[in-house]
Amino acid sequence: MMMTTKLFLLMIFFTVKQSVSQAVISVDNVSVQQGKSIIIPCLYNAKYINNRKYLCYKYLWTFCKDVQQRKGRKVFVSDDKTQHIFTVTMKNVTASDTGNYWCRVGSNVKKKIRLQVTQATPQLYVNAQMVTGYEGNNAVISCHHQTKKPKEWCKIGGACVSTTGNISGAWVQLSSIDGGFSVTMSKLTMDNTGWYWCSAGNEQMPVHITVLSRKPNRERRSFAWLVFLGLLITLICMAVIVFRKYKKKCQILSLRKRPENTYVSMKKTKLQTKQDDEDENVEAQEYEIMSSPMQRLEVQEKNPEGNESPKTDGGHITYKVDVVPEGPYCTC
């Protein structure tokens, strides 16, 4: 009877212990290279939403201490109460950070995690723990590992896929690549936002996928037109400003040159007036000559030598010339 009671109490103890342990879900083993950062997600039950969340360090959870309170540790804790996940970010890890950690919610709820800090490349790692995808598109994650152990892609607190399958409405396919495997999640939806992990044997590496909604083509075109119109208005304003500056500069230069141009114009006017006066004098002389009495032609007899003899008449010189009448004539 005593034996039966002990077995019953032992069964109750293990059942309660297992239920408490399952209240928090996270990775079991994770590796990171020295000097880099690591983000560890811890999924907790909704009934612990208001409890304190933290990561503690010690081999036995009953004596563990809050990592944030350890001197010199760059540790950040963020609680997403909508998804019931709190994350712990450890930056610039060193070899002394290797050890056992516990995701703790309140005082009794916990999940053990083994962290290994290596100098060389870890056995399992990803290029980035934070990945962004768009609704309806694909997301590709490369998981690098150097082992031939079974590989999986799991959603924290959800299903796992080893070759092909469906997770939260997205089609998942695992493909072998050089030095690891790649995970392709097709036809993403907003429900696919959350924490996942690559798994190779007993090693895991958490990855968070953020799915963004894709804007309709009409909205994107409207946005493009707004950008174009904004640029066009900016160019027009710049052109107006440049034109005004150029016009103002031309006006200033015109005002500066005006005295000089006036002097040159006056000088040209005087020269033109002088030239006009000279031309008028010449014309007057020519007119006087043209208006004087015409030279008269007088028919005089030839001198004995047969030459023309000039006469003077009032200062005018008169020459004697023989005038031959026009038309036919006869001689005796």
Image: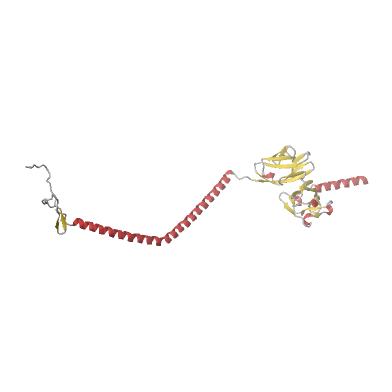
- x then y, percent, for residue 80: 72, 51
Asked whether 220 or 32 is in front, the reply is 32
Which quadrant of the figure contains the C terminus?
top left
Give the colour scheme of this rendering: secondary structure
Q: Is residue 258 above or below residue 305?
A: below
Q: Residue at x 58, y 43 (%)?
A: 217
Q: Which quarter of the figure has residue 327?
A: top left
Q: Residue at x 30, y 58 (%)?
A: 275
- x then y, percent, for residue 123: 77, 43
- Residue 156 seen by the camera: no
Toward the front, the furthest residue is 305
Which quadrant of the figure contains the N terminus?
top right
Q: Is residue 304 left or right of residue 288?
A: left
Asked whether 200 or 63 is in front, the reply is 200
- x then y, percent, for residue 27: 77, 46
Asked whether 142 or 310 is in front, the reply is 310
**Number of numbered labels in the structure image:** 0
- x then y, percent, for residue 284: 23, 58
Q: Which quarter of the figure has residue 276?
A: bottom left
Q: Residue at x 51, y 51 (%)?
A: 235
Q: Residue at x 35, y 61 (%)?
A: 267
